[in-house]
Amino acid sequence: MKTFVQKNVILFVLAAIISPCMAIDGVIVQTTDYAFREKWNYSPSTSTSLISISDTVFHEQTLFITAIASDCKLDSRKMADVVYSVKVFYPDHTLYTKWENIPLFQGKSYDIKHLHMSQQVQNLTFQGKEPLGTYQIEMVITDNVAKTSKTIESKLVLANLPSYESISFNMTMLEQWMDNYYLHPCPEQALAAYLYASQQDLLSEETRFWPILSMEKEIYQHNSFLYPQLLDCFSHQDTTTQQHLLVLIHYLGLDDAKFRAFLSTYNQWYLSYLDSNPYPDIYGEINSPVLLDMLWGNFMASGSYQPILKLIHTLDYAKYEKCLEKYKNNEDLRNASEKELNDVVKYMSYKSLVWSLTSNCRRHNIVKQYCEWASEHEKLSKQQRKDLKSILENSSQN
């Protein structure tokens, strides 16, 4: 089960419980969401920023722990000095690990009621020998100026990684999983989702294959504890599913000599083919609508700001409109140079991009927040700023 930290809700709650002496207050952030800081930093302060709070982890999975605080006291120089400490206790209540006097907010504060998230993040990874069960996390937030502190406790369950065979999908469930993953990261379901997509023949279509692969690759790259399960399942799959798994395994760099030695002749040949076809660079030149789909796949896996910013930068492809007008039918295109054909594809990508950004601003609040942030804070070209303004306006219409 996961809950959320919401930027504006926290502010409301902290303001409601504040005492007349204005003591320090705050919350624990414990999450397996590696993009949580981007979701916090790149959303307007007046908007709701959702950070998934995790209460269950698996061996070798990384949990990120930090603190958010408000209502600190300032010294005579208008400076704040807030730190936090963390202790993690075994299920038997003995100490497992601790971190002490971590800077949360130190320096000049323009608003003492402003929510501050520490720049320091502690990584907690259970290495494999720790007992399963419920661990206790104790955080103490200390205001060194006011000489006050706040103790906060939470629980964390260390569980066995479920078998991919125990996780079932249907088409509706798969669509919901992909659509909501960045809100509810559940990497333990990634393999079952990929196998289902393969078995339903979804990966035979290029327009579906690449965004799904991009999403899965992003998930696995940040959850290496899943690698053994991915490799172990390979030999139990049919030929087509093995081929789809080979693509993911290869582009994750897991197809070492030991793995290749046990492959069939066909699968070895297929890996040789993949060796000569590098993974597309989604942050390089966008020369195909497929790369736009892959950027969206990357975003759906992470909720990260960077793929959205890359999409916004690609709005400059509006400049290729004249090239499309020049070639109004297929016969004209036969006489086009390779560069002109590429320019036509870029303009078609631009048209697709405007539609997808508008649509996803409507469907996903965080996409709209990122676009609003970029519009206010990024150095954008006139074309990018013009289109982004139009996209935001259109996304607000019914």
Image: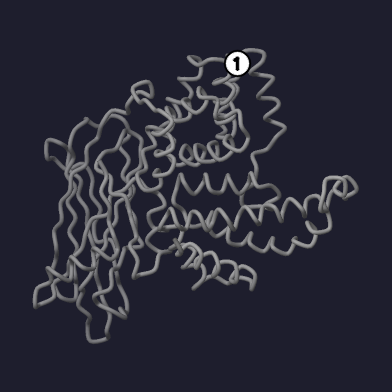
User: Mark 1 is on which residue type?
Assistant: Ala
The image position of residue 253, as x and y in percent, is 57, 33
Q: Is residue 95 left or right of residue 179?
A: left
Graded by Cα atoms within 10 Å as few (under 14), some (14 to 19) or many (20 or more), the crowding at tag 1 reads few
The residue located at (69%, 30%) in the rendering is 275
The image position of residue 151, as x and y in percent, is 13, 58
Name of the residue lying farthest toward the bottom = 76
Is 395 drawn above or below residue 63 in the view shown? below
Is 13 drawn above or below residue 351 in the view shown? below
Q: Nearer the viewer, residue 98 or 351?
A: 351
**Residue 180, picture quadrant:** top left
The image quadrant where one finds the N terminus is top left
**Residue 261, picture quadrant:** top right
Q: Secondary structure at mark 1?
A: loop
The image quadrant where one finds the C terminus is bottom left
Is 102 drawn above or below residue 24 in the view shown? above
Q: Is residue 284 left or right of residue 197?
A: right
Q: Is residue 184 left or right of residue 56?
A: right
Q: Give the residue pinned by disc 1.
A: 261
The residue located at (80%, 59%) in the rendering is 325
All told, the count of numbered labels is 1
The image position of residue 329, as x and y in percent, is 82, 49
The image position of residue 286, as x and y in percent, is 67, 52
Q: Nearer the viewer, residue 101 or 312?
A: 312
Q: Is residue 95 left or right of residue 345?
A: left
